[in-house]
Amino acid sequence: MRISLCLKKFSAHAIEVIGRPIGVSSLIRPCRVCFMEFAERAVARFREIFGAEAEVEILAVGPELVKAKFGGNMCYTCGTYDYFEDFAYILGDEAGEEWAVSGYEQLDGGEYVVEFRPRRLVGRAVRHVRIVLDGSAFDLRV
């Protein structure tokens, strides 16, 4: 059995038991609740700065992944990617490790689903480009 211990504080939620034998390879890592807390703090800070033009909602959180949905007026500007990078910077500030955009996709309604990972795991972000001509959508991944 492996025990995951919250590195920020010790409380009832901070211990997570994972069904694996204890051994030399056992790891101590922050618990899932702590990952959610740092992501929620990042969302709160992002909303303080960009709340008038950008909406963000956390879809998934893990030790090496934060998936978020972005919406609002920012989706219709040429600087949309800058909002993603700003959120990655805030995530890194809250997590204590630099984070980056690992990929994103634009949804039919104009919103974006963006994946963030620690920078050490990101080579190059996968970008989704949607071009709409005469009602037909063309999707490109670059």
Image: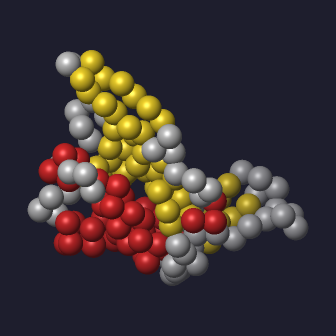
Which residue is situated farthest in the right direction here?
Answer: 24
Residue 117 found in image quarter: bottom right
Which residue is situated farthest in the left direction here?
Answer: 52
Q: Is residue 87 visible?
A: no
Q: Position of residue 69 (x, y in %)?
A: 32, 47
Quarter of the image with the N terminus in it: bottom right
Q: Residue at x 43, y 76 (%)?
A: 94
Q: How many marks?
A: 0
Q: Is residue 57 visible?
A: yes
Q: Nearer the viewer, residue 12 or 32?
A: 32
Q: Residue at x 26, y 27 (%)?
A: 132
Q: Nearer the viewer, residue 3 or 63?
A: 63
Residue 112 found in image quarter: top left
Q: Position of residue 41 (x, y in %)?
A: 34, 71
Q: Residue at x 24, y 23 (%)?
A: 133
Q: Nearer the viewer, residue 108 or 34?
A: 108
Q: How is the image coloured?
A: secondary structure
Determine whether, in the image, residue 43 is placed left or right of residue 27.
left
Determine whether, in the image, residue 73 is placed left or right of residue 64.
left
Determine whether, in the image, residue 24 is placed left or right of residue 96.
right
In the picture shown, does residue 86 fall above or below 8? above
Q: Residue at x 42, y 39 (%)?
A: 128
Q: Position of residue 55 (x, y in %)?
A: 21, 54
Q: Position of residue 22 (x, y in %)?
A: 82, 62
